[in-house]
Amino acid sequence: MKTFKKTLILVLMASISTTFSCTKEGKEGAQGPMGQTGPAGPSGPDARTFNFTLTFNTGDTFKSYSGITGFDANDVILFYVHYETLSSTYYWAPLPMIAGNMNIIPEFSKSSGFVFINTLKADGTSGSPWTSSSTLSFKAVLVKSSLLIANPGITSKNYEEVKRILNLKD
């Protein structure tokens, strides 16, 4: 019986000790020293979509856009133009392309971040292919070189496939 009483007393003391040791009492201590610097986080998304529109007027042969940011020297920019909407579904064609009587050719300057969308007559003659004002929608997809290395099968021919593979947000 003595052993039972001793065990019961020890169990009760342990539970009382545990109960009271979990309460917050007293002042908070001084802040400890700063820990070691952790590893660098990611530099940003591996792929991003930039949506923009350009209005071409009679006489224009190019327009520019300056909103692409966050690119490095080894990154790739894929360009698309909205060419059709069927049943509320947008269809995007990769650039460069021939559309009707014109060539649409993108250029990207990594030094300035400017995109130039050149429009030339498809038959090779000089001058503007525009006979009236027209606004076109474009997508520029910035793809980090590390993502291209990890996904060698990425092709720019189908925007919906690129969007799915790279988990792009429109």
Image (tube, rainbow, N blue to C red):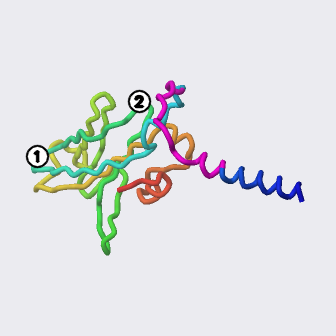
The residue indicated by pointer 1 is: 59
In the rendering, at what x and y percent does residue 74 appear? 45, 32
- As drawn, the label of residue 73 is 2
Q: Eyeballing the image, is 3 above or below 119?
A: below
Q: Eyeballing the image, is 169 above or below 45?
A: below
Is 19 one of the magenta-colored residues? yes
In the rendering, at what x and y percent does residue 141 appear? 38, 47
Q: Magenta segment, which residues?
A: 17-35
Discs 2/1, front = 2
Count residues near mark 2 (Cα–Cα under 10 Å), then give few for <14, some for 14-19, many for 20+: few
Tell me the quarter of the picture where residue 99 sits. Answer: bottom left
Image quarter where the C terminus lies is bottom left
Identify which residue, 116 or 33, lies in the foreground. 33
Amino acid at the residue labelled 2? Ala
Q: Residue at left 71%, top 50%?
A: 14
Amino acid at the residue labelled 1? Gly
Provide the secondary structure element on which disc 2 rests: loop
Identify which residue, 48 or 11, lies in the foreground. 11
